[in-house]
Amino acid sequence: MKSKHISKVIERLKKEDIGLGSREEVKEYFGFSNIINFPKGFDVDDIGELNTCDKCGNIQNPYNEMYWVGEECQETNDILEGHNAVCDECFDDLMKVKNYTWNKNNELIKEN
Ligand SMILES: [Zn+2]
């Protein structure tokens, strides 16, 4: 499953015949701020492994946690409304907008 943004990235890569061999090249073409946080040795050759956040557009590496619609609980779906997948930071933002918080059992609860 891929987020909405990554299909556009892959589309562009195919159309413009861009071969990406290193994280520097990914940064050059897409310039996403979090690329410096990719783990050392991260292999961008397999572009299919990349995902992007639907909200901020940052590239996420496959080892980063992302929140996916339909893969968690109903509360997550409610928070994600309109997004397929978002990064941790954007999920926190969306939670606040919808008045959700984590309880001590690590469950999402809606505050009144
Ligand atoms: Zn994001």
Image (cartoon, rainbow, N blue to C red):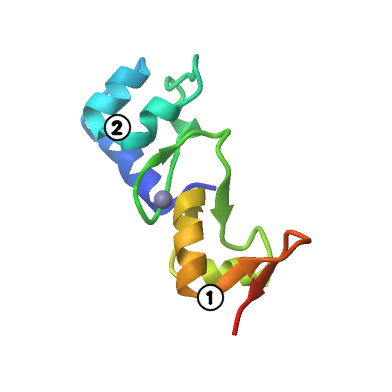
User: Which residue lies at the image location 57% right of the left edge and 61% below the top edge?
Assistant: 69
Of residue 94 and residue 13, the one placed in the foreground of this image is 94
- Which disc number belongs to residue 38? none
Of residue 109 and residue 42, the one placed in the foreground of this image is 109
User: Which residue lies at the image location 40% right of the left edge and 53% below the top edge?
Assistant: 4
Crowd rating for badge 2 (residues with CA inside 10 Å; few <14, some 14–19, many 20+): few
- Which disc number belongs to residue 99? 1
| Tag count | 2
User: Which residue lies at the image location 49% right of the left edge and 47% below the top edge?
Assistant: 2
Helix, strand or loop status at disc 1: loop
Q: Position of residue 37 (x, y in %)?
A: 44, 28
Of residue 63 and residue 112, the one placed in the foreground of this image is 112
Of residue 12 and residue 104, the one placed in the foreground of this image is 104
Q: Position of residue 39 (x, y in %)?
A: 51, 22
Task: Determine the image quadrant of residue 112.
Answer: bottom right
CA gap, disc 1 to disc 2? Answer: 41 Å
Discs 1/2, front: 1
